[in-house]
Amino acid sequence: MGAQLRIYRRRMRSVKATKKITKAMELISASRIVKAQTRVQASTPYANELTRAVSAVASYSSTKHPLTTESEKPIRAAVLIISADRGMAGAYSSSVIKEGDQLVSLLRNRGIEANAYLVGRKAINYYRFRNRAISGQWSGFSDNPTYEHAKEIANALIGAFIADAQTEKNGVDELHIVYTEFRSMVTQEPMAKRMLPLEVVESSAPPPSGALPLYEFEPSAASVLDALLPRYVEARIYNAMLQAAASEHAARRRAMKSATDNADELIKSLTRLANAARQAEITQEISEIVGGADALASANAGSE
């Protein structure tokens, strides 16, 4: 009984130490969610306005720009998957990687080869373990991305998009992004969107009433597209990375809260088992004392 009681107490100390760690990580993630959510809200209006500006140029001009014109026979597409650098976030990374695999399967069904561009160690390790080709990779900033990171990624993707996919191995005809959209503290959803050729799906506002505005582009619509579209891609990638960071913190907070609750339940269960073992040990000690007293009394009675 004594050995069993020591085992229970040792397990309780271990679980309590683990609970302190998970509780601390839960509080850290909770504090970072607010900052990440603020950054998402600050970057979204700029990204949406850039989307409207690029949409206006593409809609109200007859210019055929390579970044807005779809290829008649696309043969290759770039897929940017944004995952986490660290674990302990539940199914956050596995969900976005699964969404990326589904997108790759859809592209292959269309006869399009997919070039993988990965952000986050989880996605990189997933592809390396399966010996899959990686066209570009970035890591170390998944929970705190900056605009410089987004600009570096956008430059690589735009360079691949501008290259001729028919003649160059790294050239692509389409650009897709897979990330986790932050909707609330409890809801985050993996999303797959096409960024290039331009596909405007972000705006849900009702159409304006009255006369539509007239647009005039100086020096030319093509020059405006050359200036706007790289910034559009940078802004969309930056916004997606910020939403992914907020989703990562929310998922980690939820996972750590669940781990803390499970630790509490386990501590309660171990406490009951330890109390039962202690009670059984006390009962056995009392039984041994009573039995010894009875034996001693019987021996004394026999000697008389």
Image (cartoon, rainbow, N blue to C red):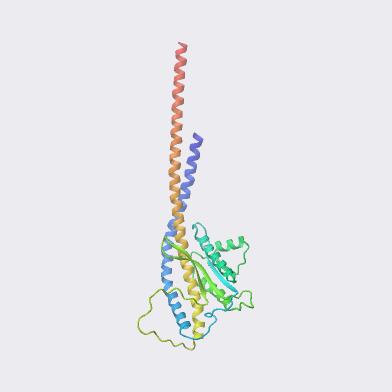
Q: Horizontal and vertical percent for residue 192?
A: 50, 68
Can you name the residue that lies furthest to the front here? 109
Q: Position of residue 73 (x, y in %)?
A: 59, 77
Q: Residue at x 43, y 37 (%)?
A: 275
Q: Residue at x 44, y 78 (%)?
A: 52
**Residue 102 in sight from this viewpoint:** yes
Instruction: Please state the total of marks drawn on the protein image.
Output: 0
Question: Which residue is situated farthest in the top direction here?
Answer: 304
**Quadrant in which residue 168 is drawn:** bottom right
**Quadrant position of residue 271:** top left
Q: Describe residue 214's horizontal placement relative to residue 220 as left or right.
A: left
Check the image and report above or below for 187 versus 224. Answer: above
Quadrant of the frame with the C terminus: top left
* Closer to the camera in the image, 80 or 274: 80
Residue 23 shows in the view: no
At which x and y percent is residue 279?
43, 33
Q: What residue is shown at x 55% (from left), y 74% (from top)?
A: 174
Q: Is residue 252 above or below residue 56?
A: above
Q: Position of residue 121 (x, y in %)?
A: 56, 62
* Between 98 and 258, the one nearer to me in the picture: 98
Q: In the shown orientation, is residue 175 left or right of residue 22?
A: right
